[in-house]
Image (cartoon, coloured by chain):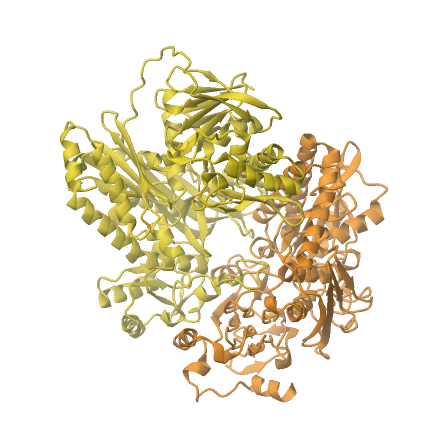
Amino acid sequence: MTPAVAGRAAAARPESERWTVAVDVGGTFTDAVAVGSAGARHVAKVPSTPDDPALGFLAALDELAAMGVVPGSVGLIAHGTTVATNALVAQRVARVVLVITQGFRDLLGYRGGSRPDLYSLQPAPPLELVARCDRLEAVERLDYAGRVVIPLTDGEVHRVAEAVAARGPQAVVVACLFSYRNDAHEARLARAIERRLPGVPVTRSAACAREHREYPRTATAALNAALRPVVGQYLLRVDAHLRARRTVGRMVVMQSSGGTVAAPRAEREAHRLVVSGPAGGVSGAAALGRCHGLDRLISMDMGGTSLDVCLIDDGVPPVRPEQTVGGHPILCPSVDVVAIGAGGGSLVRVDRAGRLRIGPASAGARPGPAAYGQGGTEATVTDAHVVAGTLGAATRLAGRLRLDPTAARAAVARVGRALGLDPEAAAAGILAVTLAQMTGAIRRVSVERGLDPRGYTLVAFGGAGPLHAGLLLREMGLRQVAIPPEPGCFAAAGLVASELRMDEARTVLWLLEPKVLPAAARWCRETARTLTRALAADGVDPRRVRLRWRADCRYRGQGYALGIPLGSGVRADLGGLRAAFDAAHLAAYGHASPQEPVELVTLRLAAHGPMPAAAPSPPASPRRRVLGPTPVERRRVVLPLARRAVLVPVYQREQMRPGLRLPGPALVEQMDATTLALPGQVLVPDPQGTLWLREAQGR
Amino acid sequence: MSARGSGLDPITFELIHEGLVAAALEMGGVLKRSSYSPIIRDMEDFSCALFTAEGELAAQADYIPAQLGAMGLVVRSILTRWGLTLADGDVFLANHPYLGAMHTPDLNVIRPVFHAGRLLAWAGTAAHHLDVGGVNPGTEGPALQEVYAEGLLLPPVHLDRRGAEQADLVQILAANVRDPASTIADLRGQRAACRLGAARLLELVARHGALRVRAALAEALAASARATRAALLDLADGAASSEGFCDDDGRQGPPTRIHAQVRKRGARLRIDLSGSSAQVAGAINVPWASTRAAVVYAVRAMVQPDAHVNDGLLEPVTLVCPEGSVLNPHFPAAVSVRHNTCQRLADVLIRALSALWPERAVASSSTAFFAVNIGSRSPVHGGAAVLADVAGGGTGAHAAGDGLDGVDTYLSNVGLMPVEVAESQYTVRIRRTELIPGSQGRGQFRGGLGLRRDYEILDLPQCVTYYAEQTDPRFAPAGTAGGGPGRPSRLVRIDPSGREVAIPSKGTATFAPGSVLRVETSGGGGYGPVRRRPAVLRRRDTSDGRDPIESTPRQRPPARAARRARRTV
């Protein structure tokens, strides 16, 4: 679509409407959602363009423009991108030179000294972020307290800068041992290299992640350096296209933490984008919860290949401070998602020992499940649904794909023969085992962390999420299920509602005693000021900036530190830390040692706040009684967990008007997902377009 | 079919099995995160598992392969000793290497699980504790001659009786180990993990019934046995043998021979270790549980059954080894440094199976397994602290590519201690940790590079126990299919004056402040003839400085060790 077309469409709309637009680039589709200041809402789905993701991004904007979302009236674009992730997977990253303390040139070569797969005698070597010839050493050394053991001379600084320049790098990373204690050496080396190589990004390990343990810190910085040119160029390209279309709004980019960062800052923070894939959906679930006053949620994204589960306990998605991607540790907060290889396309087989196995291999988008009729012959979870009848011959997947029940049945029948079961029993078995895997994933984020899932609302999305939500509701006794308006592009919807967020951390390794509290408080004060200023510069009202403090603590001698929340006030609640740590240790591991000395390992601050252009939620329409809609079909379905087939009415999602109370069993179909309600459950649509699923009897 | 004969339908079996594996994993999470010992928390030297009522391993979480199949023999010892008086709420503690444990530092905490008054199953954990007393800090000592010198010996005894902790035992333990606070805290973590495993098992019973859960535990074993048989049927029949040596007997005596003869026919595999040396004077003897673990590892890596790890995996495997062998010693031979011998056994098995199935052949990985215990103190609070570290080497090259540089190999996967952790907790300085160019076996695909790490002793004279293998060039990691061998390991003491003294591969010595212990671990063997190495990889070897022979062909004199190797072989 050309800008000219977009311009024509724009002329038909009042100029006053302001839009917030979200564009989420996924592996197969690029989804876009626009929310207008007057409550209008448009959705677009276009194929992704992996060779240049910017093209899919623009095609999605053009589709929105055709619906009346004028580029000139877009106030904010929130963008979820896989450009950093893909660059890492495809090994298309910048050429980086590393400068490191003498004696440790190979730190990124032996990667901590352990291997990724215990049983493989033929492991594929992981990508080397910095080639061995590009790893240089600097003569300098600090001790554990940050005191100088070997001074860094001016001559050495000069020599190193020249040696770096001679290699003509696209980016440079400087990492000195104990720089989390004292970053003076790192800073001098970096300044000299920046002066010698103007325009080449230089990343310092302590600036990137001021945390102890040299390998993850250096690897994080190297990853940042390797990705900066990639992310920077991509964002410049997108920006140029947006300017050409006279789009005026600011752009923010989703980070792994579930918060966004202003686009001009994203290049410097490139490593924070790597695991942002699941973040859009999770922050969408959190936003849905905020909108409905629910703060205990389980976000469940089930697509074709995997299931991502995240437990949200206080309205903000939880993060973990470290993540590993493709064998590279990354020290940056990432949404704490448990992912398992169970999706609609997960392959089902019976192994040589006669055991039923589901996933983690997936039929993917091509050939896809046997039922897609694209040449796939192996059974998948989707095929089991087709045999059971929960997906019918008339169901359209992704709005276009017609299902082939004969092919699905043949594939499932093969599995059944190997197990000695008829196709229906095999399909029921496949669905039961899939459900067990799903409950396992939910238990990992809830029961295993000492939390009872029964008080939680499940937010189910992704193409296959709503199909399994009712089963999980019953199986786990959850409170209720929320199915968002467009489950298939919920990540984009999540972007619309996301907030800007910046994170800072510092390893201190102090014995937790009253005398260290003032120093801790000083760090908190200064960091809060810095981050608040930065967010304000990016457009957040400073009065609406919220702070979340954490301190990682451990008993002296322990290795793993436990993250203790220190509240979300203007000041961190340092005084209550000791007691909070003992209590948290008792809760997590069943024992505490209030007499033992405690070490304060790392202080962390997350600052976040809404963008001014954030869209209002649409006004609630007055509640009135609505008559039950007429089903478009009545289908014979063998419901999972049941033995016999029953007739189940099938509805369209458009028929789900607020005020309706639709008893199960029922199926609700829409372009990108099918929702299943079991007998005894009830479907309740609300004015915001969310479909609620509950047990009718309050089981 | 899947649940043939067990009266259990295949779907219910999967549902219960899913729960068993999840329970073992969850136990591991509890233990790891609450642990004090770096060897548990960072090096993951522990395992968690569930057993049938008879003590067969039914589900295990995958942590360190050296503990594969661990604990089953301990459970059987408990049954023999306490079978008649078992009660709900009992928890047992054991570390006796001649009653099923692997070596004394591995403390096994095991709990019977009862349902309706009947023994249903067992939940157990084994974890390597830093010190359980004995002559040397860190308990291990290559020169030790009896298990009596290897710390406190615990046959299966009650840690808890009907839910009550046995205070006497805890007192005895505390009086015998060098870091009682950590040991006891970690034991309580192990007990918490067992309690959790038991609770999860009972949840499965509540849901599926005890009969079905019992049947599923048995079926898990049967399914893994079927998977091993199926995988064996796909492989060629035949026989092969291989041998390898440890540098010495733990006391600088003659080399210790490890020999394996393998014969595969149909769905069965026979592994005969009878050609190995008789038990030796030093502490490198291998208790039976560890010999078995090496066999499970080699079978899993080379036969590649599509199965979960449990005792069924070895059902189609016949293992032969006479008593009195270094791999099946008589009480009370010392065993604390058995791991090096185990690594060598894994290597010998993989070489024998490589000869049998050339399409799966790989070159040898380093079995140097350098380990060091330094009786140190904290620079922060001055209290005693034992530094335990391990350095890996190069892995073997294979038909699909080069080996990995500087990683732990085969049965263990212990990471290097971060420098920033080591120097903050102990009075040492790690002066360098680097790859050794030229240490790799050359070939069409090169082996991984060995590691060089320097430990400088600061502050006070410190007692250092260290051990490694493959300092003898004859025993360096071998190449395969025409590839060259990796360079042997080397240990050096550098005195404060700068004088370098080569030291034997195993020992205990006092190091003066300012002196340095340098370790150089062996590189992995190469695969295929070097002339077939693609030009692009040769160029990269040169530009990366990984292969100094390539970059400066005339300068580099052959290493003295390599010359010696040619003379002796």
Quadrant for the N terminus of chain A in the image: top left
Residue B78, percent from left and from top: 80, 48
**Front one among A635 and A555:** A635
**Front one among B513 and A192:** A192
Report the side of A301 relative to B104 (left or right). Answer: left
Residue in the image at 26% along x and 63% along y: A191
Q: Is residue B524 above or below residue A375?
A: below
Residue A195, percent from left and from top: 22, 65
Q: Is residue B358 above or below residue B64?
A: below
Residue A93, percent from left and from top: 34, 60
Q: Is residue B73 above or below residue B495?
A: above
Q: Which chain is orange?
A: B
Inspect this view and state whether residue B149 appears.
yes
Residue A543, percent from left and from top: 27, 33
**Front one among B241 and B154:** B241
Residue in the image at 38% along x and 65% along y: A130
Colour of chain A, in one word, is: yellow
Quadrant for the C terminus of chain A in the image: top right
Which image quadrant is residue B253 in? bottom right
**Front one among A623 and A518:** A623
Quick one: which residue is furthest to the right in this view?
Answer: B84
Q: How many marks?
A: 0
Inspect this view and state whether residue A533 appears.
no
Report the side of A441 relative to A656 (left or right). Answer: right
